[in-house]
Image: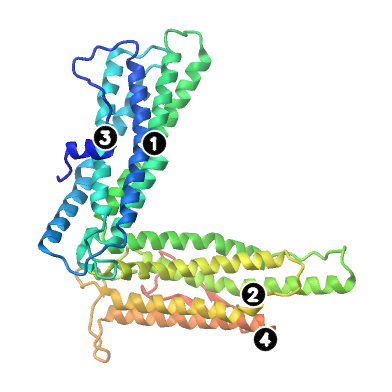
Amino acid sequence: MYVGTDQVEHSLHIGLHITVAGLQPEPQTAGLVIDGLERLANGCCSSLDDVVRLVDAQRNRHEDHLSIDHIEHVKRKAGDLDALKSSLLPSLRYLLTSLSLLLNQHDWTQKASPAELELALEIVPSLNVTVAKIFCATKSVSVLKPLPDKDHDHHLKGIKEFRCSRLLRSIKTLVVKHLCVLFMNCAQSIRVWELSSANHPANSESRTKAIQKSLGIQTRTDNSVLFIDKIIDLISNTDLAILRGEWLTVAGSLDPVLEVITNLSNASITPDMSLTPIEREKDQAHRERVVKVSGAIIPLIKLSRLFVKKISSTSTQKLPFTLDTELSSKTLEDLLDGPFSLACRLENFARGFSETHHKRSWTFGHLDTHAHQGFNELTKILEKSLAELNLHFIPLSSSDHDQDHRMDERTGKDSCQNDFINWSSDLKDLWYKAVDRCLQLYSSGPAPAEPLIEEDDEEADQRPWDTRARWD
């Protein structure tokens, strides 16, 4: 453990000046607890800002080679990262649960007992010290100086920029969206607790508010604990597991895109009787064309979703590969960026078509002008993503999954590697045909038949890399 209490209290200024030993609960004790929680909430936000500013200031200061001192620096970072995972975050989880349990067990028709207030006074300073140590460890891990930049940090394992940036982002979310709000709610709950006590036995409204506050605290505590567990998992996970989680989010983002385009492709076209006959004819032709081209984009969205879901799979039967463990942050970001860019561009297409459908422009405007460019860019993104995955995926050994492994005598590649190449080739063939159909409809020429794409079905009896898609 490399984070000292003196360093924490000196650098983060969150400290609560509450002495628990020998303290006899008095009427103002509840006020001390409330003040401590509010100061903790405000101190969290202030200290978070300090950490973020320091990380940003050091962001572009890197070294090409590590000296002896730098190696010791790496060891300290690794120690602080382990402390976050094994002790600090679990301690925070325990303290939050204890505070929530204390507030939820209280009989809201009765005044707080001295024992309850004394226990709260023990929990709040412990929270203060634990949160301060978490900030100090996060700062230690996240400040990249004097480490190599993201192009050359492949050997840094858990403290490479790809992982540290996500850790800092998660700690920020934990503080801003969970801890600060939870601490303030706890303080408010204790205030209402006092108002609803024996001093106001007939005040049912105060008791109702107190109970509502208590229920809100339980929900926020549960959410905070779940998010803390996610951060611990983030620290423990492999690079591939982190990528899979973010790829899966990308796959989910394509669902509403598909819904928008599907609805648009089935949109009914009602004549606008306020237009002249000539204008009405143009308007109807325009909308019909939008509907047709929208329908042609559906296969591209389905193929994109199929692709991203496939690489997100944790099943070794569906994805019998692991990832090179010594990839730089730049390479990992590139692997993530391909599917993300694909989803973003498809979302832009959906938005553009939806807006065009509701405009009385009778032309596709910029959509016409940039159609070929847009579809070509989508294709390049898919091709690049598949090539990068093929480069960095490593087939699992036969002992790691139940698929037979052989070396292909013709290519000299593992049979699983060939499966991936064949699957990629099938996917690209379907993609090219879907793009051709879109461009044919853009030019109002005869278009090939729409592809019939059957996306992954867990129970389907198909080989792992079968796209299960065909062109009718």
The residues bearing labels 4 and 2 have C-alpha atoms spaced at a distance of 19 Å
Residue at image location 31% in from the left, 53% down from the top: 55
Residue lying at the far right in this picture: please name it: 276
Instruction: Report the amino acid beneath label 3.
Output: Tyr
Residue at image location 52% in from the left, 61% down from the top: 255
The residues bearing labels 2 and 3 have C-alpha atoms spaced at a distance of 55 Å
Rendered view: 298 above or below 255 = below
Instruction: Report the amino acid beneath label 2.
Output: Leu
Q: Earlier in the sequence, mark 4 or mark 3?
A: 3
Q: Position of residue 13 (x, y in %)?
A: 28, 35
Query: Image quadrant for the C terminus?
Result: bottom right
Label 2: which residue?
367
Label 3: which residue?
94
Label 4: which residue?
446
Rendered view: 212 above or below 203 = below
Q: Is residue 267 left or right of residue 278?
A: left
Rendered view: 465 above or below 237 = below
Q: In the structure shown, which secondary structural element does the residue marked by tag 2 occupy?
A: helix
One can see residue 344 in this view: yes
Neighbor class of circle 1 (other Cα within 10 Å; few <14, some 14-19, many 20+) is: many
Q: Earlier in the sequence, mark 4 or mark 1?
A: 1
Check contact, mark 4 vs mark 1: CB within 8 A.
no
Q: Which mark is residue 180?
A: 1
The residues bearing labels 4 and 3 have C-alpha atoms spaced at a distance of 66 Å
Give the number of the mark in front: 4 or 2: 2
Q: In the structure shown, which secondary structural element does the residue marked by tag 4 occupy?
A: loop
Q: Is residue 281 left or right of residue 305?
A: right
The residues bearing labels 2 and 1 have C-alpha atoms spaced at a distance of 46 Å
